[in-house]
Amino acid sequence: MMDKPPTEEKTREEVEAERKAKRAAKQERKKAALEKQKLDGLENQKNPKESSTESTLAVDSVKVSKPKPDVSKTAQKKQPTQKIETTKKVINIKSNKNKENIVVKNAEEIKPTAKSVNLVKKSTGPVTHKVKLFNHLYIDSISLLTENKLKINSGKVHPSFIKLGVQMRTSVVAGSNARCLAFLYALKQTISDFVTPEHKSFARSFEEHLGPAIDHLMACRPFSVSMNNAHKSIMWHVKRLPHNISDGHAKEALETVINNYIYVQIHMAGKAICIAAQNKIANGDVILTYGYSSLIERILTNAHSNNKQFSVIVVDSAPWYEGRQLLHRLVRNNIKCTYVLLSATSFIMTRATKVLLGAHALLANGYVMGRAGSSQIALVAKHFNVPVLVCCETYKFTERVQTDSIVFNELGNENDVMPKEQWLNNRYLTPLGLRYDVTTSDLITAVVTEIAILPCTSVPVVLR
């Protein structure tokens, strides 16, 4: 029998050589891809030649690391070694071509990504100035203005409400009592000019007619608690009108209701509060007040006209400086006054004997909602054991419960806080002007109303 050539050993060597060559090629591809991502595309296009030399060196190292065959079998392995070398050369050529293709693809992929980054940097968009904590208080003024223009142009809003909306937006009409009075006078003009459509009742048609006007005012500035209570009271009387009533009788009835509300709930209530508060003012008192309140001004001027000797400290704060209006009116009536800012409250409180504060609303849990800064005045007065009296009409009482100034509040105009040029293009600066804050019931001594001088916790009893 003739000995057969060792075919199995030849095939194993070929397979091993091919596997090693493929592994080396894969490793080189990975290294090349990582290097090309870090470097620029232009530099990466110059490196394929160096990578090809590295691949040949790697294959040569593979050749060196192989075990040497026996001398007796060298004659039999000459032909397979030649085949292995040719296969290695082919693999090297293919790997070099693949590397060049990978380099070109990476260079093409890097260029558009750089362009996209530049586009993102350029398209930054408009800067929005909003405080996230009070995000629910911001109003989309652009959409509301367009809606208001459509309502005004359609003739659904009475001119008296259009005028009042402009006055409220520009703060020409400010304060709870002033805004409520202006609203009731505009409502009287609307009622006098209203004509009931045919085959419709006065109550339902007037309620539909008044809806766009109320929306217009709410878009200009949110309603105060006094305006809400007045609106609910008048609409309650409107709904109680009979269906077959004529326009003339209905208008007369509603005008008398509005006049009675103004006389009883505002004028007479203010007069009763003045009488009750004057009894608490003694000769030689130093009364501290904050901001501007029409009721506080009425109390102090009436007390001075009754020959009571006292002096007033007017505390004021930015950005509206409403205390200056009170200061001018008191000085005009020859009342001795001192004007300080809110930052000097702790210094000036040692001279005060009583604190009189106005109120925007009195909540059901006994908390007082007033001008922003009122809670600080009450807190400092509590520290110095100075009594705090809040003067408030009962038509400002509300069933709403609130323990902070975040859930429900009103934002002022940002341009009043600082000029528009300083914050409009600065994305790191957002002006915030809150109009109201909430004072806890433990900081207030008593509330002076037209009924009596009551504690803060008696609000639910009055509302019943």
Image (cartoon, rainbow, N blue to C red):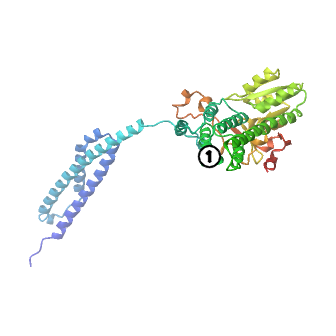
Q: Amino acid at mark 1?
A: Ser
Q: Could you say which is closer to the camera, residue 442 or residue 119?
A: 442
Identify the residue at horizontal 48%, vertical 36% (top origin). Answer: 126
Identify the residue at horizontal 38%, vertical 37% (top origin). Answer: 118
Q: Could you say which is closer to the camera, residue 342 or residue 255?
A: 255
Vertical placement of 71 versus 100: above or below? below
Image quadrant where residue 404 sits? top right
Residue 424 is situated, as x and y percent measured from the top left of the image, at: 53, 31
Residue placed furthest toward the left: 2
- Report crowding for label 1: few under 14, some 14 to 19, many 20 or more residues within 10 A (C-alpha): some
Q: Residue tagged by mark 1?
A: 205
Left or right side of 314 for 88: left
Q: Could you say which is closer to the camera, residue 327 or residue 433?
A: 327
Residue 208 appears in the rendering:
yes
Residue 141 is situated, as x and y percent measured from the top left of the image, at: 55, 37
Callout 1: helix, strand or loop?
Answer: helix
Residue 279 is situated, as x and y percent measured from the top left of the image, at: 89, 34
Identify the residue at horizontal 61%, vertical 40% (top origin). Answer: 213
**Which quadrant, please, contains the N terminus?**
bottom left
Left or right side of 243 for 66: left
Residue 225 appears in the rendering:
no
Vertical placement of 392 versus 365: above or below? above
